[in-house]
Image (cartoon, rainbow, N blue to C red):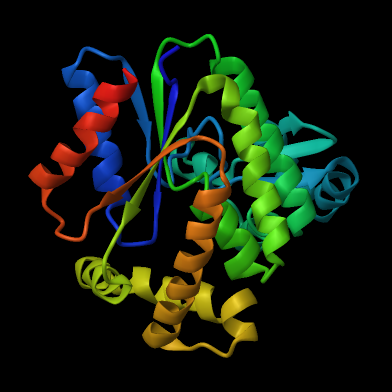
């Protein structure tokens, strides 16, 4: 059976988005029906972006605190497990719903990526399980960028400074869930972490790097190791790179590494094409 899922991973600035788009284009050129989900897609079938979660009891308390917002909350809530999902980004960006500031901030505090790690992992594993179950008979090839290794390692290592065992178990559980989809993991590498990250910094807005510095150095691993600023981020990325190689080696999936150090689109295509030809 041909793969139904291709996962693209790598460090920030390595060229994951470009690689995922190249894979999508190559598949289309071969007449293969494909669907690409890049980082931050609000309709991602296996991940959550801009979605909060409240268990039933907490949601009842929340409703009592904001009785004037009952109509809005009931309009957008989605029953899930023992509670409710609140897709607040979709509510704002697609439904044009305007939240009172305090209400919105309290919703964000319960974003799935801000929850205690045990609950976060439970929700994500359930999401991936539902995805794998529903897509196993799908004829499309799904391409995911960043959500298989990057998101778990970011929330467990970078945010919560969890033990390696927690992260490895988390990602291996994801790998076991998607086995029926015959997935391929493509890991994008760079010769120089510093150069590739600084290239990303030079190409993106100041708000992006400010947010990146805050997230990476003011909590979890960065805070524990007293790492600051750009130099602190580079040290964290070096540690993350070592850990991701360990994770890559431990995963029992079809997997390939691609060197994208030259950021050359034609060379990247030349390296991706044999992988696609071999598997489709």
As drawn, 139 above or below 213: above
Number of numbered callouts drawn: 0
Residue 2 position, x and y percent, is: 41, 15
Q: Quarter holding the N terminus?
A: top left
As drawn, 112 above or below 270: below
Depth check: give the residue in front, 172 or 118.
Answer: 172
Depth check: give the residue in front, 231 or 65.
Answer: 231
As drawn, 161 above or below 230: above
* Residue 111 seen anywhere in this rendered image of the structure: no
Q: Residue at x 63, y 38 (%)?
A: 174
Residue 259 position, x and y percent, is: 25, 53
As drawn, 200 above or below 174: below
Q: Residue at x 68, y 48 (%)?
A: 170
- Apparent side of residue 54 relative to residue 101 in the rendered image (left or right): right
Residue farthest toward the right in the current orientation of the protein: 57
- Apparent side of residue 115 relative to residue 137 in the rendered image (left or right): right
Depth check: give the residue in front, 196 or 191.
Answer: 191
Q: Residue at x 52, y 72 (%)?
A: 215
Residue 124 position, x and y percent, is: 66, 41
Q: Quarter holding the C terminus?
A: top left
Q: Residue at x 41, y 25 (%)?
A: 142
Residue 85 position, x and y percent, is: 69, 39
* Residue 134 seen anywhere in this rendered image of the structure: yes
């Amino acid at each position: 059976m041909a793969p139904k899922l291709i996962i693209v991973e790598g460090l920030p600035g390595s060229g994951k988005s470009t690689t995922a788009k190249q894979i999508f284009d190559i598949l289309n050129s071969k007449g293969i029906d494909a669907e690409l989900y890049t980082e931050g897609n609000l309709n991602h079938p296996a991940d959550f972006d801009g979605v909060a979660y409240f268990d039933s009891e907490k949601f009842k308390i929340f409703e009592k605190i904001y009785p004037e917002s009952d109509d809005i909350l009931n309009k957008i809530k989605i029953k899930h497990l023992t509670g409710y999902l609140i897709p607040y980004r979709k509510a704002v960006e697609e439904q044009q719903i305007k939240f009172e500031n305090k209400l919105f901030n309290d919703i964000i505090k319960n974003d799935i990526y801000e929850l205690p790690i045990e609950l976060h992992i439970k929700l994500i594993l359930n999401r991936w399980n539902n995805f794998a179950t529903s897509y196993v008979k799908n004829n499309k090839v799904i391409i995911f960028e960043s959500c298989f290794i990057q998101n778990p390692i970011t929330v467990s290592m970078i945010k919560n400074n969890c033990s390696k065992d927690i992260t490895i178990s988390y990602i291996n559980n994801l790998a076991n869930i998607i086995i029926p989809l015959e997935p391929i993991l493509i890991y994008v590498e760079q010769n120089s972490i510093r150069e590739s990250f600084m290239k990303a910094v030079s190409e993106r807005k100041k708000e992006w790097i400010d947010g990146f510095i805050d997230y990476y150095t003011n909590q979890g691993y960065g805070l524990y190791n007293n790492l600051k600023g750009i130099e602190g981020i580079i040290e964290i990325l070096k540690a993350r790179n070592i850990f991701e190689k360990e994770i890559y080696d431990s995963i029992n999936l079809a997997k390939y590494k691609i060197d994208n150090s030259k950021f050359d689109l034609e060379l990247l295509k030349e390296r991706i094409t044999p992988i696609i030809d071999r598997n489709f």
